[in-house]
Amino acid sequence: MRRSVYNEDHEAFRETLRAFIEAEVVPVYDEWYAEGLVPREFYYKLGELGIFGIEVPEEYGGAGEESFKFQAVVSEECARAGVSFGGSSVHVALCLPYVKAYATDEQKKRWLPGFVTGETMYAIAMTEPGTGSDLAGMKTTARLSADGSHYVLNGAKTFITGGVHADRVIVCARTAPPSPEDRRHGISLFVVDTRSEGYAVGRKLDKLGLKSSDTAELSFSDVKVPVEDLLGEENKGFSYLGQNLPQERLGIAVGAYAQASAAIRFAQSYVQDRTVFGKTVASFQNTKFELAACKAEVDAAEAVCDRALDAHDKGELTAAEAASAKLFCTEVAHRVIDKCLQLHGGYGYMNEYPIARLYADNRVNRIYGGTSEVMKMIIAKSMGL
C-alpha cells in the first residue's frame, strides 16, 4: 500500500538525508561503533544540514516547522542504513520540546541559536541510580541560595544519552520535598551548563547496544545554577515531563518500526546471496514463509505509526494511544528482528553484520521511554480497568 503520511517536502528531505548518510556516515560508522562515540564535530555537520533547526522557530535560526514527521524520516533513514547519529536524537526529540514550551523569550534567545548549529548540544537527565522509572523518587536536590541569585545542585543521574558530549543538560531536581498528597510535587527543571564547577561526567556506560550513542553517569557537587536557568516554574517539573511523553513514545515506536523494516531488507539481501546445499537460502519455503510473516507484521506496524504521526501533527495523539503504538511496534520489532537474525545463521551473530547490531540496538526499545509493562498499565487505565 502506498504511504500517504509524508508529503513532497518530507520526501525531498529524505533524499537529501539518504545521500548525506551514504557520504558522511556509512564510510566511517565502523570506527564510531568501535569507539563507542560519534565525533563531536559530526554534530556541526548535522547543524549545517539543518537537522537540528527543523522545528525551531524562524526567529531563532530554525525552519519553523511543527511536524514531527521530519524526525520520523531521520529515524527511518538511519535504520535503513544501519547507522546512528549518536545522542542527537535526544537533542532534538526530547530536549527541544521542553525549551520551546517552557523557556522564556530571553532564554530562547540565549539557547536556541546554538541549539540549531550544533554548537550547544543538549541532553536530559531524569533517571537516577536506584529509581529507574520511579521519577518521583529522585533524590537530586536544588536549593535556592540565601540571596536568591542561584540554586545549589547536588545529586547524581545515570543512563544519560548524549551525556558525554552535552554542553547543556536539562536536569530534573527536587526544589521541595514531596507532599503527603502528591509525591510528585517539588520537582523542577534546570538547563545546566556542563562547564559549571562541581559538574562531572562519570563513566561512559558500556551498553549491550546503541554502541555509537554515548550514555553516561553524571554527578553534581554544589553546582551553582543561575536562577535565570530555571526552566518553567518551580515545582512543576513532573507535569512538564508528562507533556512530552506521547511524542517521546511515538518516536520510539517509529524507530522500532524502522528497525524492523530494515531487518527485513538486510535479511532479504542476505538470503538471496547466501547459498547452502547448492541452493540460495531464499529458495527454501521456510525462508519465504518467515520473511512473508515478518513483512505482514511490519506492514501493520507501519500503519500504526502513520496513524499516530498524523494524530500527533494534529495535536490529537493521546497518552494511551502513544503507549499503544510504542507497545505494539516495539514488540513487533522484537519478533521480526529475531527471525531475520535467525535467517542469517551464524553470521547473524557477528557484529560485522548490521543485523547483529540491530538486534542489540532494538532491545532497549521495550525499556526506555517507559517499559512495555508500564505501557500496558497506561492502556489498561484508559480502558477503565
Image (spheres, rainbow, N blue to C red):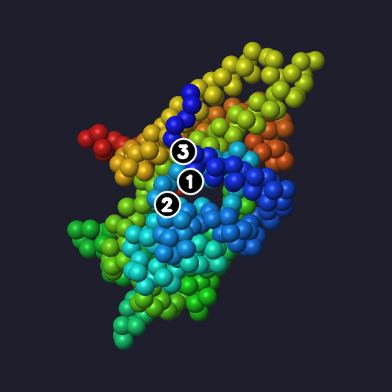
At x 68%, y 33%, the residue is 348
Q: Tag 2: Cα neighbours inside 10 Å, few (<14), some, or many (≥20)?
A: some
Q: Earlier in the sequence, mark 2 or mark 3?
A: 3
- Against 137, residue 328 (above or below) is above
Residue sitting at the far right:
278
Rendering coords of residue 267 (x, y %): 65, 28
- In front: 17, or 338? 17
Rendering coords of residue 374 (x, y %): 36, 42
- In front: 377, or 256? 256
Q: Tag 3: Cα neighbours inside 10 Å, few (<14), some, or many (≥20)?
A: few
Numbered tag placed on residue 65 in the rendering: 2
Q: Which residue is mark 3?
A: 7
**In this rendering, would 232 be left or right of 286?**
left
Q: Amino acid at mark 2?
A: Glu
Q: Amino acid at mark 3?
A: Asn
Q: Are marks 1 and 2 in contact (CB under 8 Å)?
A: yes
Q: Which residue is mark 1?
A: 70
User: Which image quarter: residue 359?
Assistant: top right
**In this rendering, would 49 be left or right of 150?**
right
- In front: 273, or 24? 24
Q: Tag 1: Cα neighbours inside 10 Å, few (<14), some, or many (≥20)?
A: many
- In front: 146, or 267? 267
Select label 1 or label 2 by which is in front: 2
In what quadrant of the picture does the C terminus appear? top left
Q: Could you tell me how far apart the alpha carbons at marks 1 and 2 are, in whole angstroms? A: 9 Å
